[in-house]
Amino acid sequence: MSVQAVARRYAAALADVVTARGESREVQAELSSWERMLEDNPDLLEVFRNPTIPYDQKRGVLSALIARARVRPTTANFLQVLLRNQRLPELREVNRRFALELDERAGVVLAQVTTAREVPPAVQEGLSGRLSSLTGRRVRLQFAVNEELIGGVTTRIGSTVYDGSVRTQLQQLRQKMAGEQ
């Protein structure tokens, strides 16, 4: 089974639990911190990945880290389940799917916005409002900068791309002119 499929299952199960307990965002924040910690400590990640290290030693390391971090019981239990099923190294993908699952349940859609330059907060708010009107849902914006766009904006919501970049407009104009000559 693919990492994405496994992550989707874990994310959905965790979302069921945290939604029922009313601790969705808190657990999400704690798991994001764990993800950063694992990424910042490749040796620690290798401990959890390495099949030659006995499970009891891994469990001891995880238990010590959990005690230090003082996370919620739900987060601690989830991390232990991931370790037991040898999925802790896949925490990044699980977190990504978990965030998407929580957004979907809350009626929020992710919009990935790419612009040629940084976008001021006032413009971000306006764009969020227009995209909310377009989709009929609340929108969470994720911004990226790509100077090759020259200007304008591209937005991806799910599998739909809205391309208003100057680069694309110039390419279309070039194709029209090449076809008319």
Image (cartoon, grey):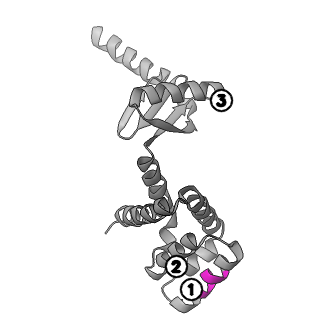
Seen in the image, is 24 located left or right of residue 8?
right
The first of marks 1 and 2 along the sequence is 1
119 over 51 or under it: above or below: above
Q: Main secondary structure of the magenta part?
A: helix
Name the residue tied to disc 1. 59
Secondary structure under badge 2? helix
The boundaries of the magenta stretch are: 58-64
Distance between mark 3 and mark 1 Cα atoms: 44 Å
Name the residue tied to disc 3. 121
Secondary structure under badge 3? helix
Amino acid carrying mark 2 in the image: Gln
Seen in the image, is 83 located left or right of residue 57?
left
Name the residue tied to disc 2. 80
The first of marks 3 and 1 along the sequence is 1
Amino acid carrying mark 1 in the image: Arg
Mark 3, residues whose alpha carbon is within 10 Å: few (<14), some, or many (≥20)? Answer: few
Q: Residue at x 56, y 38 (%)?
A: 144
166 over 50 or under it: above or below: above
The first of marks 2 and 3 along the sequence is 2
Secondary structure under badge 1? helix
x, y percent for residue 71:
64, 70
Amino acid carrying mark 3 in the image: Pro
